Image: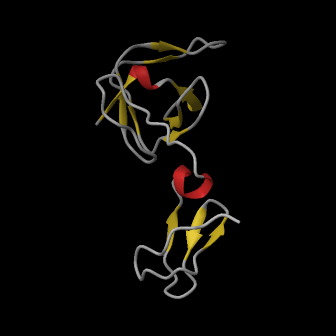
Amino acid sequence: MSTLPACPKCQSAYTYEDGVQLVCPECGHEWSATPTEAAGEEVRVIKDAVGNVLQDGDTVTVIKDLKIKGSSLVVKVGTKVKNIRLTDGDHDIDCKIDGIGAMGLKSEFVKKV
């Protein structure tokens, strides 16, 4: 059985998992479990082109024109991408770009705002 961290708000030891969230039944506080808390493994640190650490929900700017495979569309330099989600795999970032839609980006082509 895995041991879950205590509630950061009331320090209760009776926390439980609800999907990807951790929940405290005593005070009702909910927080997201980091990969080390949930699975006991190493956290992968994803950095942008200049070395800033990226997190879910950050806003980034594209630093290079990016052609989209299978399309004539181009993501231009300076395009602002809000509310990114970090993923594992070849493309580190899942996002939604206005006028283009959902897509994956590599962290080496973005800069944190």
Please tell me how many numbered marks the rendered image carries. Answer: 0
Residue sitting at the far bottom = 26
Residue 2 point in image, percent of width and height: 66, 63
Q: Nearer the viewer, residue 32 or 109?
A: 32
Residue sitting at the far right = 1
Q: In this view, does 23 lie above or below 107?
A: below
For the N terminus, which image quadrant? Answer: bottom right
Quarter residue 48 falls in: top left
Q: In this view, does 71 lie to the left or right of 105?
A: right
Residue in the image at 56% along x and 25% along y: 91
Residue in the image at 53% along x and 80% along y: 13
Residue in the image at 57% along x and 76% along y: 15
For the C terminus, which image quadrant? Answer: top left
Residue in the image at 36% along x and 34% along y: 60
Q: In this view, does 46 lie above or below 32?
A: above
Residue 71 point in image, percent of width and height: 63, 14
Q: Is residue 86 above or below residue 100?
A: below
Residue 56 point in image, percent of width and height: 46, 46
Q: In the rendered view, how is the structure colored?
A: secondary structure
Residue 57 point in image, percent of width and height: 43, 48
Q: In this view, does 49 lie to the left or right of 32?
A: left
